[in-house]
Amino acid sequence: MAVSPPGDIVLEVARAADPAAVRSARTRLEIAAGLAPASANAEAGAGGARTATEKAAGAAPEAFKKFEAMVLQSFIEPMLPSNAENVYGGGLSGEMWASLLARELGEVLAERGGIGIADHMLSEHYTIEDGQKVPVRGISGGPEKEEADRQALLSAALVEEIERRAAHTIGLNAQEAARSRRDT
């Protein structure tokens, strides 16, 4: 049996709230949705809220959002009620609808900024260039690859030459030590 509160309970709560707090909350919601100008941010006292343009400047690539959505879906799905046949339906189709709801909630949350999982987990795969996240990529071919290979060969040759000289010097020092022992 489901609980069915009266429809005007939300309206009663809104009426009982402080009007200044309601205005502030409404302004913060408009700022978060990108509907209010950036100057309203200071007026609302939103502190951590970012405007739509600020979000776009540091927006995560699509791969970040998909990863965040997948992780959020795996968090949300177990939190959904398991015995809610009146909401999702019964059997396999009910499980499918619950899974689709969790996926949609995860995607919406990720689209709205998520909780920072993707930024944290995938940050080592991206660098910041001119305020934009750019994927870190290797050198696959062409003149850049040839130059990298040449530098690697030069470095290896330099290390081998240093090792040869060190071995030669150690050998000379050992021969001199042996001669000095014989002479004494």
Image: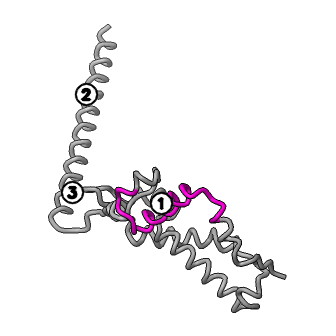
Q: Secondary structure at mark 3?
A: helix
Q: Position of residue 102 (x, y in %)?
A: 61, 77
**Dominant secondary structure of the residues highlighted in magenta in the image:** helix
Camera-side residue of 126 and 105: 105
Task: Give the spatial CA distance, label 1 vs label 3.
Answer: 51 Å
Amino acid type indicated by mark 1: Arg
Q: In the drawing, what numbered circle is on residue 150?
A: none
User: Residue, x 68% and y 68% (percent of image)?
Assistant: 12
Camera-side residue of 46 and 151: 46
Q: Quarter-wise, where is residue 38 in the image?
A: bottom left
**Rendered view: 122 above or below 173:** below
Of callouts 2 and 1, the N-terminal one? 1
- Which contiguous range is marked in magenta? 14-40
Q: Position of residue 35 (x, y in %)?
A: 39, 69
Q: Is residue 39 magenta?
A: yes
Amino acid type indicated by mark 3: Ala
User: Which callout, 2 or 1, points to the residue nearer the camera?
Assistant: 1
Residue 33 in view here: yes
Camera-side residue of 73 and 176: 73
Residue at the spot of label 2: 169
Of callouts 1 and 3, the N-terminal one? 1
User: Which callout, 2 or 3, points to the residue nearer the camera?
Assistant: 3
Q: Quarter-wise, where is residue 39 in the image?
A: bottom left
